[in-house]
Image: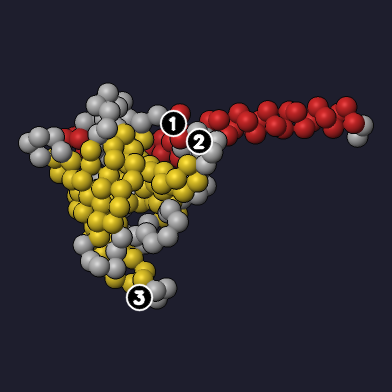
Amino acid sequence: MDYSKFALLVVILSYIEECWSSSCVVDSFTVKQDFDPKRYAGKWYALQKKDPEGLFLQDNISAEYTVDDEGVMTASSKGRVKLFGFWVVCADMAAQYTVPDPSTPGKMFMNYQGLASYLSSGGDNYWIIDTDYDNYAITYACRSLKDDGTCDDGYSLIFSRNPRGLPPAIQRIVRQKQAEICMAGQFQPVLQSGAC
């Protein structure tokens, strides 16, 4: 291949890479328009997850969301976690959500704490990427950003109201949204055996 063809190929590849990475800039991700926490409230079961770095719930993950009279959403969640590489226990977590910008209620900040000393506490952005309130919800969090605005350490959960799964039409929507948040192919199934 002569030099001019090689140079053209390099320019084209760098353009494609730039287009791809700019679409993965976290601030460009869309969230559920006019998110309604009262419709979101209730029990959800995790069917798929993309873990962040470090300790994260392993399986049998469920979350019960409630909304108080002032509109504040809280959640209690359960799931199994593996500690010290071998000890598997059911863990309880609690979280409270705030909405920094009321014009984008689907972008929340979650303060969470483990209800046992071995579980972590902290805060993450918590976005509702999409939901139909009755069947599925896709959540997303980015714990740290790279210099180019893409996510360095993020996680996502695919929730269902039914622990047995989602119908094919909804699975297609979920796969599309996973690609939109640049996590296609990174999810693993979440066992729902009723262990917790």
* Three-letter amino acid code at the position of disc 3: Trp
Relative image position of residue 169 (x, y in whole percent): 39, 36
The quadrant where residue 71 appears: top left
- Residue drawn at (43%, 53%), measured in percent from left and top? 52
- Marks 1 and 3 sit apart, C-alpha to C-alpha, by 38 Å
Question: Distance from label 2 to label 3 (Cα)?
Answer: 37 Å
Which residue in the structure is indicated by mark 1?
A: 27
Depth order, front residue of 9/53: 53
Residue placed farthest to the right in the image? 2
Percent across and percent down for residue 185 are: 52, 47
Pointer 2 residue? 149
Classify 10 Å Cα crowding around label 2: few (below 14), some (14-19), many (20 and above).
some
Q: Secondary structure at mark 1?
A: helix
As helix, strand or loop, the secondary structure at mark 3 comes to strand
Looking at the image, residue 163 sits to the left or right of residue 51; the answer is left
- Viewport quadrant of the N terminus: top right
Q: Residue at x 33, y 72 (%)?
A: 88
Q: Residues within 10 Å of mark 1 (few under 14, many from 20)?
A: few
Quarter where residue 105 is shown = top left
Residue kind at label 1, given as amino acid type: Asp
- Tell me the quadrant of the picture where the C terminus can be found: bottom left
Q: Secondary structure at mark 2?
A: loop
Return the residue nearer the eye: 64 or 192.
64
Name the residue carrying label 3: 87
Q: Is residue 167 visible?
A: no
Image coordinates for residue 124, horizontal then vertical, percent: 33, 46
Q: Is 84 on the left or on the right of 186, as rendered?
A: left
Q: Earlier in the sequence, mark 2 or mark 1?
A: 1
Task: Determine the residue located farthest toward the bottom in the rendered image.
Answer: 86
Query: Is the C-beta separation of discs 2 and 1 under 8 Å?
Result: yes
The residues tagged by marks 2 and 1 sit, at their Cα atoms, a distance apart of: 7 Å
Foreground: disc 1 or disc 3: 1
